[in-house]
Image (cartoon, grey):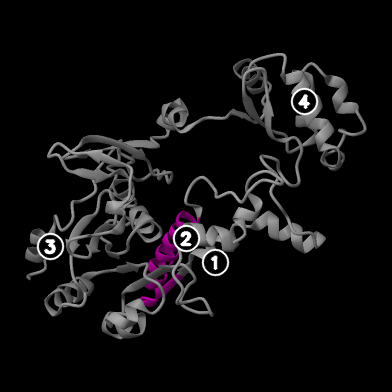
Amino acid sequence: MTTKSKGPLSGILVVDLTRVLAGPFAALMLAELGARVIKVEPPRKGDDSRHIGPFVKAKNGHTKSGYFMSVNRGKQSIALDLKADADRRIFETLLTRADVLVENYRGGTMEKLGYGYATLKDKYPKLIYAAVSGFGHTGPYAHRPAYDMVVQAMGGVMSLTGHPGGPPTRVGTSTGDLTAGLFATIGIVTALYDRMKTGHGQKVDVAMLDSQVAVLENAIARYVATGEVPGPLGSRHPSIAPFATFATRDGHIAIAAAADHIFATIADVLGKPEMANDPRYRTNPSRMEHWQDLHADMEAALAARGSADWLALLEKAGIPCAPLNNVAQVMADPQVHARNMIVTAEDPDIGPWRMQGNPIKLSAHDDPATRPPAPDLDADRAAILKEFGL
């Protein structure tokens, strides 16, 4: 029997100088993988996301942000004014032991504070300096501010989202922030591995706009191949049919057929085997050419039963398919629970608080059903100062 450790990054100290979402999410992922994260926040106000809803009422009558709690669990908090000499000394003492510094100010801000990478790299040669910003630290937009909406608009994803002819539509989650946070996590872990070989730290520069461009995969490929600018397609796939949501008697279901033999099986399940031999539907290119006819014929057949009945038949036949779950249904899904993707933090002022889990499952490390709560502002100041001899 083996004893699992707290995480592969156990022993790594992260100083988290981030706020709102992209940077805090990167630091959260490092914490989930076992790193110790000390969150440095501005005095009095703290991270901006402490003041962004949804809010929940605590036992003491105050409110807490569920948004903040969801991306800052398991961290420690100390409030420091980086323009005050005494707090700067504390911050610099933290850096003497830190493996990673994560910040998500706009380009140039850390330099103004005297903590840009060019200044820190010689004083702390093993430090991994990770910067997550809207546009990165180079290029003509480097000093611009950005939020998720800005990079979703600039990065092209909004031009691909929604239905043809509809208004511009934001992706339903903060994909501009979250993709940047994930790429930053990859960059940090890669830099830590590189440090094992070289003995030196380095700068990790991740831009939210870059991260949006990086996930345009099929859209960029289509534009380069055809010269046509891709637009929104609703739930349809741009290159595969059927690969969309379809109306049933009582709702909608998702059906995905990435191969001709899968479509033939779908036709059998729908009670329309002749569709597989229809010249319009025999191959994926012909189905793409005639996708409107295909969708109409499939929905005419699907109208005979409710979604649950069709899903049971399609699943039995081995067809990739799914219900259209809302968030409450996702959180109640047995597969989601089996994968420990809804975890609980025991907040001292609120009690049990459910939130998203960690999708990275490692065989050598535990994935507990409970997590430490997010810290109150400056909650760990006394303990940190004592530990660091301050």
- The answer to whether the residue labelled 1 contacts the one labelled 2, judged by CB atoms less than 8 Å apart, is yes
Mark 4 or 1 closer to N-term? 1
Pick whichever, 218 or 45, lies toward us.
Answer: 45
Q: Is residue 60 a member of the stretch shown in magenta?
A: no
Separation of disc 3 and disc 4 at Cα? Answer: 63 Å
What is the three-letter code of the residue carrying label 2?
A: Ala
Residue 256 in percent (x, y) is at 69, 34
Mark 1 or 2 closer to N-term? 2
Mark 3 or 1 closer to N-term? 1
Q: Residue 210 carries which label?
A: 1
Numbered disc total: 4
Disc 2 packing (10 Å; few <14; some 14–19; many ≥20): many
User: Which residue range is magenta in the image?
Assistant: 176-205
What is the three-letter code of the residue carrying label 3?
A: Ile
Residue 171 in percent (x, y) is at 54, 48
Residue 273 in percent (x, y) is at 84, 20
Mark 2 or 4 closer to N-term? 2
Question: Which residue was labeled with disc 4?
Answer: 298
348 sits to left or right of 337: left
Separation of disc 1 and disc 2 at Cα? Answer: 8 Å
Q: Residue 180 carries which label?
A: 2
Task: State which mark lies toward you, 3 or 2.
Answer: 2
Question: Which residue was labeled with disc 3?
Answer: 384
